[in-house]
Amino acid sequence: MEKVVLSGMRPTGKLHLGHLLVLENWVKLQEEAKCYYMIADWHALTTEYENTGGIRQNIIDLALDFLAAGINPEKSVLFVQSEVIQHAELALLFGMFTPLSWLERVPTYKDQKEKLGEMGKDLNTFGFLGYPLLQAADILIYRANLVPVGEDQLPHLELTREVARRFNFLYEEVFPEPQAVLHTIPLLPGIDGRKMSKSYKNEIAISSSPEEVNEQVKNMITDPARVRKTDPGHPEVCVVHTYYKVYYPEKVAEIEQQCRTAGIGCVACKKQLAQKINEVLEPLRERRIEFLKGERYLEILSAGQRKAEETAKETMRLVREKMKLR
Ligand code: SF4
């Protein structure tokens, strides 16, 4: 069976080093499967319906981040969700036979509604409740059988499988039951040690210039007990050390030893890390420039739309036929 992958991200701002770890897996997958990578703008609207002003720019930023990270438009289909309207048609049809209770019991539904509710967002909307169903349509419209997800997304994928099973049972076999490609992505904290988040401004964007990276790394929180350079440090409580583990693993043992014996100062330790991160980001910067030339990213998105639409139309033709709508 041909391996078909669907994944996507919401265009809510620039991607950071934590996202880059996810994208590295996407890049690997495009060598072994037919991959559809989606800029999920409708998903962004489920929580950001009041603030749509920046969405177009966010779509462009996300497309450039994807391409810079190595998503290859010759191998993968890169597209904007709202430009392939068949997603919406399929979600609507799925809505006809999906019991409300399936959506209400998705664990993130209540959690997120409460959490974002406390931040002043009213998520008592049909769009927010129904978004796992739209996600099911995103996956099944390409009859994808593999979905790269984090552990927190597993219940959503289970719902997608239930929807596929119900459709296949009610009408005729059209959809595969997609399986998770589980990647354990190490959790990167923000530079201040809190969760990495745009609202805390504690992220290192993958589109950062070398100067911005140097500045962000310089501001990273270190071992608070290490006041002087001669004090031995505790790397396990230091944000810099966490970044070393992820982005400079070959240096971790040496840094730990030097830190514990006060053999290196934090300034020098950070400088090496910043250099390494800049080395990692350099090819991304070069690719970004290439894709910006003559707005190549726009052609790529249009070509992606056409390719995605071709498959989506074929699936909808089958769906309508099996549902006796045509
Ligand atoms: S030497 Fe490095 S690992 Fe140790 S506390 Fe300073 S920045 Fe952190």
Image (cartoon, rainbow, N blue to C red):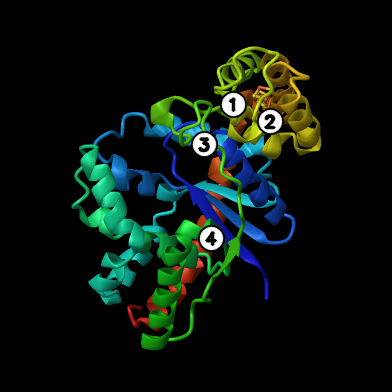
Corner quadrant of residue 147: bottom right
- Disc 4/disc 1 C-alpha distance (Å): 32 Å
Q: Helix, strand, or loop for circle 1?
A: loop
Which of the two discs, 1 and 3, labels the residue nearer the N terminus? Answer: 3
Q: Do the residues labelled 1 and 2 touch (CB within 8 Å)?
A: yes
Q: Give the percent coordinates (x, y) of residue 105.
A: 29, 68
Q: Give the percent coordinates (x, y) of residue 133.
A: 35, 64
From the image, state whether disc 2 or disc 4 is nearer to you.
Answer: 2
Which amino acid is tagged 4?
Answer: Glu
Q: Do the residues labelled 2 and 3 touch (CB within 8 Å)?
A: no
Q: Residue 207 carries which label?
A: 1
Which of the two discs, 1 and 2, labels the residue nearer the N terminus? Answer: 1
Residue tagged 2: 284
Q: Residues within 10 Å of mark 4 (few under 14, many from 20)?
A: few
Which of the two discs, 4 and 1, labels the residue nearer the N terminus? Answer: 1
> In this image, 71 relative to 320: left or right?
right
Give me the residue at 48% from left, 84% from top. 173
- Disc 1/disc 2 C-alpha distance (Å): 8 Å
Q: Give the percent coordinates (x, y) of residue 228.
A: 64, 12
Asked if the residue at label 1 sits under 8 Å from ligand 1, the reply is no
Q: How crowded is mark 3: few (under 14 residues within 10 Å), some or many (20 or more)?
A: many
Q: Residue 310 carries which label?
A: 4
Q: Can residue 194 be seen in this view?
A: yes
Which residue is nearer to you in this view: 202 or 286? 202
Residue tagged 3: 62
Q: Helix, strand, or loop for circle 3?
A: helix
- Disc 2/disc 3 C-alpha distance (Å): 13 Å
Corner quadrant of residue 135: bottom left
Give me the residue at 58% from left, 55% from top. 36
Q: Is residue 299 visible?
A: no
